[in-house]
Image (cartoon, coloured by chain):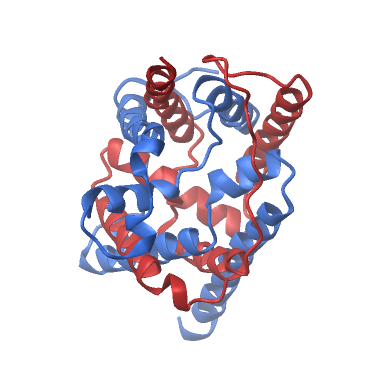
Chain colours: A red, B blue
Amino acid sequence: MHEERKNFKSLFGFPLGIYFGIVLTKSRVISWFKIRKMFYFEEPDLYLIIGSAVAIGAISVFLIKRLQAKDIAGDTIEVLKKPFSKGLFFGGAIFGVGWFVTGTCPGPIFTQIGGGEWFALFTLAGALLGTYAYGLLQKRLPH
Amino acid sequence: MSLLEPWPWYVSGPLIGFTVPLLLILVGKPLGISSNLRHLLSCALPKTRIEYFAENDWRREFWNLLFAAGLVAGGFLAERFLTHVPTSFLPAHYHSMGGALILLGGGFLVGFGTRYGNGCTSGHAIMGLSNLTVTSLYATISFFGGGLLSAGTLRLWEHFFQ
């Protein structure tokens, strides 16, 4: 029974992805031009979008923890914190360069492809190669 | 405001934020998209000896691959039914052989960097900061550090050589 419940919950990933993809598109977060304007401080939109998203997210997480809320299958919601690693700085900065160059972070890669931007397949291919390279080098990188 | 126009930040920002509680309540999982890159490779390479992929139980995170599939579908639906004018995703000069190489190289940095940094804009900047996680603050600062440094470098290059 419990395993069935878990599978049932996983299925909500799809409609929530659709929701997120539509919002990313309509907010223009998936546009290279918007990302350039953010990094050149030509437009405050992206900072305001991230800021207001975090505000809503933070209030929600606070309430979920305070109320010890359960998810729809009745399991207690655990909101784990990611562990510290030096990779946060090195990897984070490397991603920042890639974000500037491609104008895309991982979510928008998928949404651009769905929106008919076929050249985003090159971004996806690059991202998978980069992920593979990380897997190969993981043990030798400082963490 | 028409739904078909681009949505302003004060609509889209909060709607992005609501993804955090929706995922926690409906799926029981924190938002984070870049781990799908690892799951895709774990799924595609079942016989690999690379521990990073072999020791990753992607079936347990299947919800996230469904989320990524939803992102594709969402992009399609928004472009097909929710806009008058097609969105310009990438600049015209990226639609070339050189552009493909730029995207491939930049994509490499996105994949390598998000996995080394254990998260991207969704997992660290939105989810991690919503959870008041210091490590995610370090990561977010590093994202902008890398991006702003690139922006400054490109501006200097254009100033002196073009």
Residue A90 position within the rendered picture, expressed as x and y whole percent measured from the top left:
57, 71
Position of the N terminus of chain A by quadrant: top left
Q: Which of the two residues, B129 or B24, is positioned nearer the viewer here?
A: B24
Q: Quadrant of residue A130?
A: bottom left
In percent of width and height, residue A83 lies at: 64, 55
Residues B88 and B123: in front is: B123
- In the rendered structure, the answer to whether residue B124 lies left or right of residue B4 reads right
- In the rendered image, residue B94, in percent from the top left (x then y), is placed at 30, 60
Q: Residue at x 65, y 29 (%)?
A: B10
Furthest residue in direction right, as rendered: A66
Q: Up-down: is B34 above or below B148? A: above
Residue B113: x, y in percent?
A: 48, 64
Residue lying at 63% horizontally and 18% vertically, measured from the top left:
A70
In the picture, residue B75 is in which quadrant?
top left
Quadrant for the C terminus of chain A, please: bottom right
Is B30 above or below relative to B160?
above
* Residue lying furthest front: A1
Residue B80's place in the image compared with B119, above or below, is: above
